Image (cartoon, grey):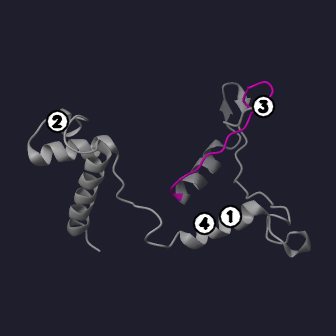
Amino acid sequence: LPLDAETRRAKGFAHVTFSICEHAVRAMSELDGSTFQGRILHVMPGRARARPAAEAGGAAGGTSSFKRKREEAQKAQAGSSHNWNPLFMRADAVGEAMAERYGVDKRQVLDSEGGGSLAVRLAQGETHLLSRAREWLPS
């Protein structure tokens, strides 16, 4: 529910998103004009906000804002396969998986007094687990 910034009370309207179009149409037809908690509901389809000309790409002087340029650069990089790792694993998940694989307690894997750096061991473990996951997952 949208809240008023000053009073922190509901503004009196809400936005509802339906995953199936037919459900939205049925909700509109059944609920519009009905009474809820002593108030009459008025259900309307949502409309996209009209964007100002500067946001729509027609900025004055033919230049884009910094934010718009940054968003365009991010969109251009979104298709790149090397910009992020969809198989990212948290350090605790790596520790659990390594402990399970080697049949030891997670505490032994994460022991900072063992040989080498803990960060290096976790990074190597994550690399090993991700390479196994890539072999298992279809391309």
Tell me the quarter of the picture where residue 49 sits: bottom right
Determine crowd level at label 3: few under 14, some 14-19, many 20+ residues with C-alpha closer than 10 A. Answer: few
Q: Residue 70 got which mark?
A: 1
Q: Which mark is residue 74?
A: 4
Which residue is under mark 3?
Answer: 5
Disc 4 marks which amino acid?
Gln
- Element at label 3: loop
State the residue position of label 2.
Answer: 108
First-in-chain label (2 vs 3): 3
Q: Nearer the viewer, residue 10 or 52?
A: 52
* Magenta residues, start to end: 6-20
Please state if 32 lies on the left or on the right of 17 as rendered: right
CA gap, disc 1 and disc 3: 29 Å
Q: Residue 78 in the image: x percent, y percent? A: 53, 69
Q: Quadrant of the C terminus?
A: bottom left
Between 9 and 38, the one lying in front of the other is: 9
